[in-house]
Image (tube, grey):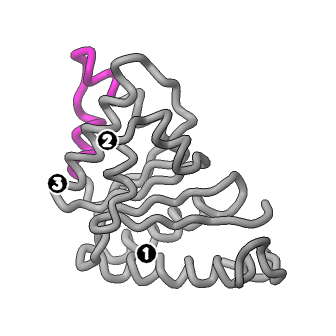
Amino acid sequence: FNADLFSDEILPGKKFSQRKLMCKTREWCENWADNYPNVKETTVLFMGQSGLGKTFLMHAMARRLLQRGKQVLLVSAYRFLDAARKAYFGGSHEEIDAMLEADVLMIDDMGAEPMMENITVGQWFNLISERQNSGKGLIISTNLQKDELRNQYTERIASRLLDVERSKLMMLTGKD
């Protein structure tokens, strides 16, 4: 993590710079990875445009968790949907079972996977609900904004990902 990569100029409409935001975000992520499973929010949603460090932070958290002996699975949203589709149509359940059983599941780039009618939204809902109901960690990154998340995945999914009791929204902003 190199804070010097981020601008020290105050962000438009904010009272802080992108560098300060990223340093605070890094600190929060380190604390979460150091203390999991004893964390308030078991779901973390990284939201922001491309190139702001969402994937980098997920990888750093995964590394810290692995060093602590936690079972971590990091997959792309495309890979998740492919595994869910295979399980849905009666194929192999091994990949989706691994996603449900890992201590922490990280899914990168929600919103980049194909939207398959009657499959994509349903499988996301099932995965998020199962992970949250079991109290297991779920970290998702997306380039979507809140309204896009609601429109593409329904209010039911958005409300689970944005539930302040169980979820932490990490809104990243600034320049690529």
Mark number for residue 141? none
Q: Quadrant of residue 54?
A: bottom right
Mark 2 or 1, closer to the camera: 2
Which residue is rendered at x = 37% and y = 41% of the image? 155
> Which of the pair 28/144 is nearer the observer?
144
Q: Amino acid at mark 2?
A: Arg
Please tell me which of labels 3 and 2 falls first in the chain.
3
Residue with the mark numbered 2: 156
- Residue 71 in the image, given as x and y percentages of width and height: 29, 61
Main SS of the magenta segment? helix
Labels 1 & 3 near each other (Cβ < 8 A) = no
Q: Is residue 48 magenta?
A: no
- Residue 134 in the image, given as x and y percentages of width and height: 15, 56
Give the quadrant of the N terminus.
bottom right
- Residue 14 in the image, given as x and y percentages of width and height: 71, 77
Mark number for residue 64? 1
- Secondary element at image label 2: helix
Neighbour class for label 1 at 10 Å: few (<14), some, many (≥20)? Answer: some
Residue with the mark numbered 3: 133
The magenta region covers: 84-101
Q: Amino acid at mark 3?
A: Asn
Q: CA distance from mark 3 to mark 2?
A: 15 Å
Neighbour class for label 3 at 10 Å: few (<14), some, many (≥20)? Answer: few
